[in-house]
Amino acid sequence: MTKTLYLIAGPSGSGKTTLTNKLMEEENIVELVSHTTRDMRKGEKEGKTYYYINDKEFRDLDKLEHASHEDKKYCLSRKEYDNKFKNNNDVDKAFVIVNEHGINQIKEKDLDCDIVVINIWCYPPDAFDRIKQRDGKVKAENRFEYDLKIGAFNLFDIADYSINNSNGNFNKSFNKLKEITIKEKEVSGISW
């Protein structure tokens, strides 16, 4: 059985988490949860949103990809990939939310699966408004500036698929994401 790992990328506030949470409700797909050294936000859950760890624990992880932002570190561990996906015979599709650097790092690894990159994007004013509503104006300005700096709004060249999730497009965006996973399933011969 060919397995498929979806690398979900895009700017903060583009709706990556919201869309993938809905996808998990409707489809047989597993999220590979990243580790982070940042503090837990209100409403987040250990092992669901992230694995929250300290700097020493982070250094000791075998990482498939890693990134940092505002002195906080993020990564996908080899253990998470192996346990939830590679060695799990009940799972043939998984996704992880990463940035551009994570995409490149994962693609450089010798993973025994197909890799599909999905860029979920929205117009910058929409992203800024969403981050501001979630985290406040100062954090929104910092995050928005960082996303512009690293090119998070410009992942079209490295993505296999791009989905515009600007305001008012959620249902259309979700249907497109679902269609992509079904299309990839048919191409790889996997049936759900």
Image (cartoon, rainbow, N blue to C red):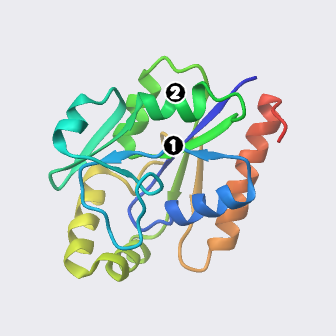
Amino acid type at image mark 2:
Asp
Residue 151 percent coordinates (x, y)? 33, 51
Mark 1, residue position: 32
Tell me the residue at 21%/32% (across/down).
Answer: 59
Residue 186 percent coordinates (x, y)? 82, 37
Residue 162 percent coordinates (x, y)? 58, 52
Q: Nearer the viewer, residue 154 or 71?
A: 71
Q: Nearer the viewer, residue 51 or 114?
A: 51
Residue 103 can be seen in this image: yes
Mark 2, residue position: 82
Quadrant of the drawing holding the C terminus: top right
As helix, strand or loop, the secondary structure at mark 2 comes to helix
Disc 2 residue crowd, few under 14, some 14–19, many 20+, Cα 10 Å = few
Q: Is residue 58 above or below residue 142?
A: above
Quadrant of the drawing holding the N terminus: top right
Amino acid type at image mark 1:
Leu
* Mark 2 / mark 1, whichever is N-terminal: 1
Q: Is residue 141 left or right of residue 17?
A: left
Disc 1 residue crowd, few under 14, some 14–19, many 20+, Cα 10 Å = many
As helix, strand or loop, the secondary structure at mark 1 comes to loop
Q: Quadrant of residue 74?
A: top left
Residue 115 can be seen in this image: no
Q: Is residue 158 left or right of residue 172?
A: left
Q: Is residue 69 left or right of residue 151?
A: left
Q: Quadrant of residue 167?
A: bottom right
Tell me the residue at 24%/81% (across/down).
Answer: 137
